[in-house]
């Protein structure tokens, strides 16, 4: 297993290899050493707790990182984050209020429809007269099923006396 300093040097070298060959050719030995030191310093964690756990997963694998330490970011970045969170919160609150108003409008309109439509639907479609005849309901096969549905059982048949002929 590599020691930490060897691992840091290996990683820094791998990062420098990612530079275009034309740029690599312009670097002298002193610049390469300074870049390696800077990359190692940048890479080293300044956290009290730095746990990195690999998770085997089909197709490559994942890892979980848990870091704990002081926030080292600049105050401007922290202020910008707070402003972004405030804007995000305001946007979410506006969205939730819009959804609530929309749902309330739908419920209100459906209640109005129900209120006005019941007065229309309670009136008979046609007046009772010679065209209104009781009808046998064939899918009610016994007295109990028939009477539970609000119909009458006569002569082994379920009869609907209020059957609408336009049905």
Image: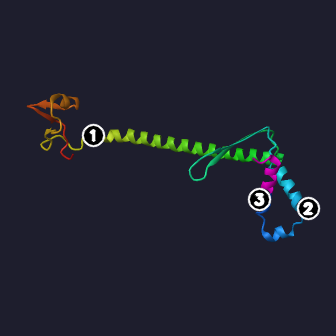
Give the Cα separation between the discs numbered 2 and 3: 17 Å
Return the disc, 3 or 1, that comes first in the chain's sequence: 3
Q: Residue 74 placed where, x, y %?
A: 83, 47
Tags 3 and 1 touching, CB below 8 Å: no
Front: mark 3 or 1: 3
Tags 2 and 3 touching, CB below 8 Å: no
Q: Nearer the viewer, residue 160 or 125?
A: 160
Q: Residue at x 52, y 45 (%)?
A: 102
Q: Residue 139 placed where, x, y %?
A: 17, 38
In this view, 149 is above or below 64: above
Give the Cα separation between the discs numbered 2 and 1: 98 Å
In this view, 13 is above or below 100: below
Magenta segment boundaries in residue numbering: 1-12
User: What residue occupies the far bottom of the structure in this picture?
Assistant: 22
Report if residue 54 lies within the magenta region: no
- Secondary structure, magenta segment, majority class: helix
Q: Residue 21 placed where, x, y %?
A: 79, 70
SS label for mark 1: loop
Residue 91 horizontal side relative to residue 138, left or right: right
Q: Nearer the viewer, residue 167 or 144?
A: 144
Q: Which residue is mark 3?
A: 14
Report if residue 4 lies within the magenta region: yes
Return the disc, 2 or 3, that comes first in the chain's sequence: 3
Q: Which residue is mark 1?
A: 123
The image quarter containing residue 49 is: top right
Q: Which residue is mark 2?
A: 30
Q: Quadrant of the C terminus?
A: top left
User: What residue occupies the far right of the structure in this picture?
Assistant: 30
């Amino acid at each position: 297993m590599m020691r930490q300093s060897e691992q840091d040097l290996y990683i820094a070298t791998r990062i420098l290899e990612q530079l275009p060959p034309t740029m690599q050719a312009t670097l002298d030995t002193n610049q390469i050493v300074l870049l390696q030191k800077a990359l190692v310093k940048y890479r080293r964690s300044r956290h009290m707790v730095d746990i990195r756990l690999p998770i085997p997963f089909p197709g490559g694998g994942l890892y979980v990182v848990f870091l704990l330490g002081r926030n080292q970011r600049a105050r401007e970045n922290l202020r910008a984050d707070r402003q972004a969170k405030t804007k995000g919160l305001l946007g979410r609150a506006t969205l939730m209020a819009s959804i609530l108003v929309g749902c309330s409008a739908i419920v209100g309109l459906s209640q109005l429809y129900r209120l006005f439509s019941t007065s229309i639907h309670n009136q008979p479609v046609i007046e009772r007269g010679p065209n209104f005849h009781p009808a046998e309901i064939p899918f009610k096969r016994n007295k109990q099923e028939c009477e539970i549905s609000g119909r009458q059982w006569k002569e082994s048949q379920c009869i609907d006396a209020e059957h609408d002929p336009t049905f």
